[in-house]
Amino acid sequence: MKFVTIGYGERAGYDATDQAVRDEAHAHDARLRAAGVEMGIAGAPVQVRNTGGDGTKVEEGAFMTSALPVAGFAVVEAESLEEAVRMVAGTPCAVANGVVEVWPLQSAQG
């Protein structure tokens, strides 16, 4: 199964976390990337609309809001939701006063 993960966190929470914990979290991310997990840091988002096929409109900024800014994304493969949770529990957002959402990715292939 594939899962999309969204990490939320802010610099102040990250900086307040013990350096050894942050170092291990980054090493954890490196191990996930070495195992084939696709991950990246979030850039500036845009909203795209094409209501009724009448033309594309693009607006800067996120549509969703949260208490913490989006920090990054990953696509992980795991046997279960529980395994996906274990995979992301050691990442920087999870350990440094942030949060990681794990979303099961269901096929749109019908």
Image (cartoon, rainbow, N blue to C red):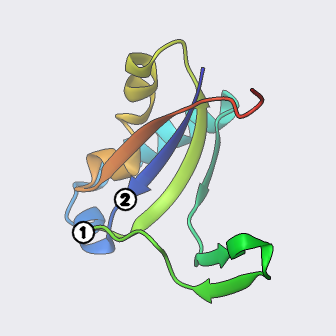
Seen in the picture, residue 83 relative to 65 is either above or below; the reply is above
Q: Quadrant of residue 42?
A: bottom right
Q: Tell me the residue at 79%/72% (across/down).
A: 53
Q: CA distance from mark 2 to mark 1?
A: 9 Å
Seen in the picture, residue 37 relative to 41 is either above or below; the reply is above
Number of numbered markers: 2
The spot of residue 15 in percent (x, y) is 27, 68
Residue in front for this viewpoint, 19 or 55: 55
Residue 81 image label: none
Q: Tell me the residue at 32%/72% (across/down).
A: 11
The spot of residue 104 in percent (x, y) is 51, 31
Residue in front for this viewpoint, 25 or 100: 100
Q: Quadrant of residue 88?
A: top left
Residue in front for this viewpoint, 76 or 54: 54
Question: Quadrant where the N terminus lies?
Answer: top right
Residue 8 image label: 2
Left-right relation of 86 to 48: left
Left-right relation of 34 to 17: right
Seen in the picture, residue 105 relative to 55 is either above or below; the reply is above
Three-letter code, disc 1: Ala
The spot of residue 80 in percent (x, y) is 47, 15
Asked if labels 1 and 2 touch by Cβ distance under 8 angstroms, the answer is yes
Residue that mark 1 sits on: 67
Which residue is most to the top?
79
- Closer to the eye: label 2 or 1: 1
The spot of residue 51 in percent (x, y) is 68, 74
Instruction: Determine whether the residue tagged by mark 1 lies in a helix, strand or loop.
Output: loop
Q: Tell me the residue at 28%/46% (across/down).
A: 95
